Amino acid sequence: MDLGCRLHVTDLNGITQPGDIMLAVVLPLHLNKVYQKVDYTERPPKPTCTTFHFENYQQLQSMIYAVGEINRSPSILPNATLGFQAYDSCDVLQMDLLGTLQLLTGTSTAIPNYRCVLDVPLSAVIGASVSTHSILRAHILGLYRYPQISHFSTSPLLSNHIKFPSFFRTVSSDIFQSRGLAQLVLQFEWTWVGLLAVDNDYGHQGIQLVRQELIKAGACVAFSENIITSQPDHNAPHIVEVMKASTAKVVIVFSPAINLLPILFEMSKQNITEKLFVASEAWSTSSLFSAGPFSRLLEGTIGLAFYSGTILNFEEFLNGINPSMTLGRGWVRIFWEKAFNCRFIDGIPENSTNACTGGEDLRNTKNSYNDVSSLRATYNVYTAVYVVAKALADLKNCRDGEGPLIQRKCADFIDFRPWQLLHYVKRVRVKISNGRELYFDENGDPPAVYDIVNWQPSTDGTIQYVKIGSYDTTASLNQMFAINTSAILWKIESHLPPVSLCSESCPPGFRKAVVSGKPVCCFQCIPCPHGEVSNNTDSVDCIQCPWDQWPNTEKNKCLKKTVEYLSYEDALGITLTSSAVVSSSVPMFILQFYIKFKSTPIVKANNYHLSCLILISLSLCFLCALSFIGYPNSEKCVLRPITFGSIFALCISCMLSKTIMVVLAFMATRPGSSLRKWTNLKVSYAIVVSCTFLQLLLCLTWLLLSPPYYQYNIHIKPDVIIVECNEGSPVAFWTMLGYLFLLATICFIVAFLARRLPDSFNEAQFITFSMLAFLSVWISFIPAYLSAQGKYTVAMEIFAILASSWAVVICMFLPKCFIILFRPDRNSREHLMKKA
């Protein structure tokens, strides 16, 4: 091998622990970097790494601790030791790629397509943290089929096992996280949210999935902005201006913690504190924000976090490192200086106050490095090491005849190929601390389980991440998403969850109307139309009430309509009933007078028998008004036209007959008249019977062809059911009234012409006034009847019946009763003859 034939690249410094089988790790121990200005007059320098991250250093220590546990265990890999190589990628893509090539080469020099340590196989590579870096690394490792297990890369692109056949991860895909974040937002009825994402594969894919889930659930996106990492200010001023201008109170952020820092600095600078963040797992438990100027901005934040695990005796291991140890001394010294705020200086004076002695005790410090209360990404690294160890153990324990290779052979544990170990990684199952079992599906993804955390201020002024629920996709549907809302602490100003809506909810009784040109979450609340209700908040449509119901005043429920008819209990009904009954007694009372004084001249002179028949029919006319009162039913609706039409026809026929008899009697007194034979009672009765029979015939024809019936009228008053009788045939109804009108008109004309006949024989003037009043009442009835509604239509009919009947009683019989009672001197034959 020609070592001179290689790319001239800068080698990375890392740590190596020898072993029979090697494990490779590339972690970003530093989270930030400074690029030097390049003018290409000399070799471009490496980026300068800054911001040493305690959490990621803890992850490195968990890998070292796990390897130590495996090597000490006699049951996992007996007679074999697991070694490792680890590099710091500084969160730089080029350095992550360089570290991967050096791991494949096996030395601190990257030589593509060469492995310089032939007798020590490379088992797997753990990392990277960033999804974009993992994608690049997966393309390279996938060529050789080296198993790659990421502890922090969540992009759904990495679930494509055709493009990335050797990629696995101990964290869940963002497909599940995006659904969880959308459900978390909708749990608190936040339908108007902003989206903020870092401009890489992790951010773009994750926030796009969240958007889809939100829109699918009916929520809306107020704004969507990218954190542009290629710009020095990360586009922070523009993003903060958009956030300030938006009415959305909730912002979902898909970004690593380090990329969010410029945004928070700008928000703090502009004193924007009313926004609530919903955090993705990349920063939901980051220690970068636990103290400092951002606690007021971030308190109340809710997010999804990787499920936490515990590592036995891990805290003692973390506190046991010191600068004198050989393995990774350079990184230990950097950590030591940051942890104790001191510096390692050779030959420092004795009175130096910030010099590191190496004798400091980590147990006296409290930071994210030795905080093992909630191990998340650290536990994922620890689990990834055990996944590799379990796959190696399964490969080592394979027996010929049961193996996966041709002829059921097993791979050589001392000299296996990467693809041979890949077979066992796909099928590995590892018990984790919470009792669950970790395994990989066909896409290399583990079961998706998240903790829901809330950022709450602690007594020392820092922020603590309190678990308030869980999101477990392996649970049943009704237990998949669980959250204890009573454990949440919101922002100090309100202590209440924020309201993030584009438009206030429409109360019951209203419906939502989309505003043109705006998202569906921005709407107007429009009252439901007449006859419709909405009984839910934010109803899209109003529903029509059933025909027998009507909305209440608030239009949020349907009530039974009021049933209206002229009842006996109604005040108007009681009045009309009493009037009809009392009125009917008046003609009968007058009849008693007539019977008592039937032998007197004034009774004899005016056709006693017809007068009695008229009084009886008038009493029945008053009583027929009762058929119009009460609940209309089929019998009443049929009875009304027969009783009304027939009785009134009888009454007017009698009066017409009497009028004709008066005229015939006068004409028969002329000398030589032949009309005397027509003045007997039979003729008068014949007139009465024939005129009444025609009305009866008309009513019977009406009943046979189109009889009246009762109906529910809901058109006149929408909120009232009017129970009424339908005439069946309006033509028949008006024909019946027209016939009565015709009889009354003929009677009026004949009586008017005969009004000046001698008084001894003449009753025509009384009949004239009676028919004039009768016709006036019924002519006035027509417009009043047509304009009245509901029970008042029936009341108008009853009033017309009573008024027209009273008109006949008053005009026809009241003068005679007056004479009979108070002027008996006029009730004599001499007086009548004298007047004649």
Image (tube, rainbow, N blue to C red):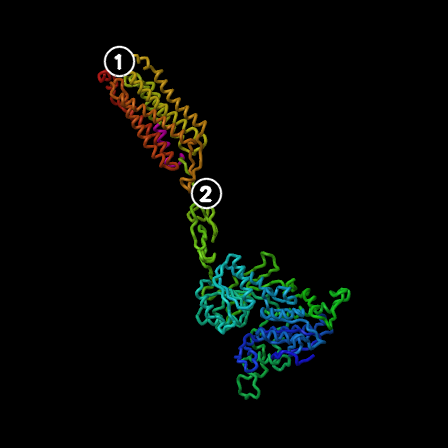
> Which residue shows up at 36% across the image and 19% down it?
687
Determine whether 366 is above or below 466 in the image.
below
Q: Nearer the viewer, residue 215 or 358?
A: 215
**Residue pointed to by mark 1:** 670
**What type is the residue that disc 2 sits on?**
Gln
Q: Name the quarter where the N terminus is drawn.
A: bottom right
Is residue 386 visible to the viewer in this orientation of the structure? no
**Residue pointed to by mark 2:** 549
Q: Where residue 212 appears, x then y in whole percent? A: 54, 60
Task: Find out whether residue 259 is within the magenta segment.
Answer: no
Q: Quadrant of residue 173?
A: bottom right
Separation of residues labelled 1 and 2 (CA atoms): 73 Å
Determine whether 227 is above or below 673 in the image.
below
Label 2: how many residues lie within 10 Å, few (<14), some (14-19) or many (20+)?
Answer: many
Q: Name the quarter where the C terminus is drawn.
A: top left
Q: Secondary structure at mark 2?
A: strand
Q: What predominant SS class does the magenta segment belong to?
A: helix
Q: Which mark is residue 653?
A: none
Determine whether 533 is above or below 201 in the image.
above
The boundaries of the magenta stretch are 567-583
Q: Where residue 496 appears, x then y in whole percent? A: 47, 62
Q: Nearer the viewer, residue 233 or 61?
A: 233
> Which residue shows up at 32% across the image and 30% down it?
777
Q: Earlier in the sequence, mark 1 or mark 2?
A: 2
Query: Is 702 situated left or right of 772 in this image?
Result: right
Query: Is 424 situated left or right of 306 in this image?
Result: right
**What type is the residue that disc 1 sits on?**
Arg
Q: Quadrant of residue 523?
A: bottom left
Determine whether 637 is above or below 335 in the image.
above
